[in-house]
Image (tube, helix red, strand yellow):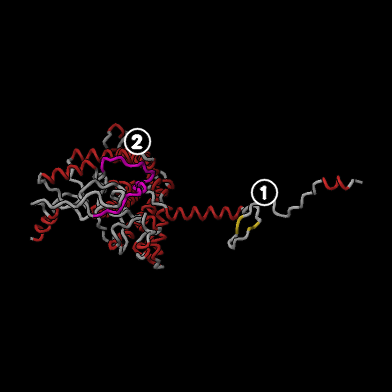
Amino acid sequence: MQSPDSTASTEPFPAINYAAPSGLSQSPSADGSRSATVNRPTASSLSGRLRRASLSFEQSDLPEGFFAAAGGIASSILTRQAAPRPVSSSVGCSSVQAPQAGDIPLQPARVQSVPEEGAQEANHDGSSASQTPSKPSGEPPAAAPFPNGYHFPPKHTFGQSMKLGGLAFWNYFLTPVGFLVTIYGLNVVAWGGMLFLLLCNAAPAMCHPTCNDINSPRRIWVEIDSQILNALFCVTGFGLAPWRFRDLYFLMQHRLQRKPEALRRLAGIHRGWFRLEGSAELPVDLGPRNLDTESAQAIPRSAIPFPEEKMPEAPLAGVRARATKVWKMDLVIWLMVWNTFFQCCLAGIMWGLNRYNRPGWATGLFVGVACIVAAIGGLIMFLEGKKVKGIEGVPVSQKDMEQLERDREHGVWHYNNLKDKDLDAKGKRVKK
C-alpha cells in the first residue's frame, strides 16, 4: 500500500474527453452549432462541382467562330490605338485594370486622352484636372467635343490605318485563342484556294487521262481538299455547338416562357454589340464596377445584363447606344445553329459516302449554305458592333489627342464621329 504522502504527490489520471477526435472536421451549421461530420460524401462533392461547372458554362462568353471573330475584329481593328493593351486570352474580351482611388466618372473637362478603362483620371481631392475650354471661333458644331470632353480620334491615313491594324492584329495573334484562330483561318484560306484552283482546272498536268476522270490526280486532290475543309469546318460547327445551343435555350426561354432573365443573360454574353431596352436611359457613369452603390440599386434590372458584372463599361463619349432590335439576336443565334446543322449534313455526306457514289451537288450545296449563314451572322455582329462604337466612343491614344489639340488651335477641324465627316451636311444634301 502507498503512503498518504505518495498518494498526494501522484498526478490524477487525465479525464476522458468525449469530444470528437481531432481528425473529424467540425463546421458550424446554419444555426451556429457545430456538427461532427467527418467528410462530405463523394456524391455531394461531385454534385457541387457539377453545379459550379454548369454556372460557369452559363455565364461564359461564346467562343467565336472564324466569321464571328473576323466580324468583331473588323469592327474595331482600324480604331484601336497604338497604346499597349494587356494580353487577353479570349476573343473580343480585353481585360481592364481596376480603377484607382482617385478615379472618377467622366466629367465635363478639357479634351484629353481617354484611357481604355473608360474612366477619367482626376486629382486626389476629387476635382477634375482641367476645365472646359472656350469654343474657338469658326468651329463647326459637329466638330466640338462632347460635354464630358471626349472627342473621337482623327481620321487616319491609309498608312496609319494599316499600321494600327497590323499592331492590333499582332496583339490579338499573341493571345492563345488569337494564335489558334489565325492558324485555322490560314488553313481555310490555303486549302480553299487550292480547291478553287482545282475546280477551275488551273493545273492541266493533273488532267490525266482527262480532267473529269474519277482516277485522275485532279479528282483525287479535289477529294483530299474537300475532306480537309470539311474537317476544318467541323472544328467550329461541332466545337461551338454547346455554346450555340446554350444561347438557343436562353432564346427559347425568352420567346416561349417570357423569362426576362434569359434575354439579360444573352445581353451579357453578346455585350460587345447588343444593348437591352432601356439601357440608353441608364446613367452615363454607370459601369460594372459601381453597380453596388445606393443610387444604382434603384435602377431597373431589366436594362442591365445578367449577371450584372457582364454589363458593358461606361461609354467614353458619355452617350449610350440605343437598344438593339431583339430580332437581330434571334437571327444571329439561329444562323449559328443552322451553321452547325448544315455542317452535320455535310459531314454525313462526306463520311457516309465515298467519292464514287457521292453526288457532286450535295457537297457544294452544304458547303455554300454553311458558309453563307455563318458569314451573315458575322456581318450582323460587325455592323452592330461598329454602330455601338460609333455612339459610345473608342479609346483615343495620346498621339491622337495631341493632334486634335494642335489642329484645333490652328483652325483645322475634325468632326466628332467615327468617320470624321460632316454627317449633318451630308444629311442635308440627301434631303435636297
Front residue (pair 14, 393): 14
Front residue (pair 20, 64): 20
Task: Identify residue for label 2.
Answer: 216
Q: Position of residue 81 (x, y in %)?
A: 26, 42
The extreme front residue here reads 5
Q: Is residue 106 magenta?
A: yes
Q: Position of residue 338 (x, y in %)?
A: 36, 55
Task: Identify residue for label 1.
Answer: 23
Query: What is the tally of numbered marks visible in this picture?
Result: 2
| Identity of the residue drawn at 76% across and 52% down | 16
Front residue (pair 258, 307): 307
**Up/down of 55 relative to 228, above or below:** below
Dots 2, 1 in contact, CB < 8 A: no
Which residues are the magenta region? Answer: 81-107
Label 2 Cα crowd, 10 Å radius (few <14 / some 14-19 / many 20+): some
Q: Position of residue 149 (x, y in %)?
A: 21, 52
Query: Residue type at mark 2?
Result: Ser
Element type at mark 1: loop
Query: Residue type at mark 1?
Result: Gly
| Identity of the residue drawn at 19% across and 38% down | 159
> The C terminus lies in which quarter of the figure?
bottom left
The residue mark sitting in front, 2 or 1, is 1
Label 1 Cα crowd, 10 Å radius (few <14 / some 14-19 / many 20+): few
**Up/down of 325 relative to 353, above or below:** below
Q: Position of residue 144 (x, y in %)?
A: 15, 53
Front residue (pair 345, 91): 91
Q: Is residue 286 left or right of residue 111?
A: right
Q: Is residue 426 magenta?
A: no
Element type at mark 2: loop
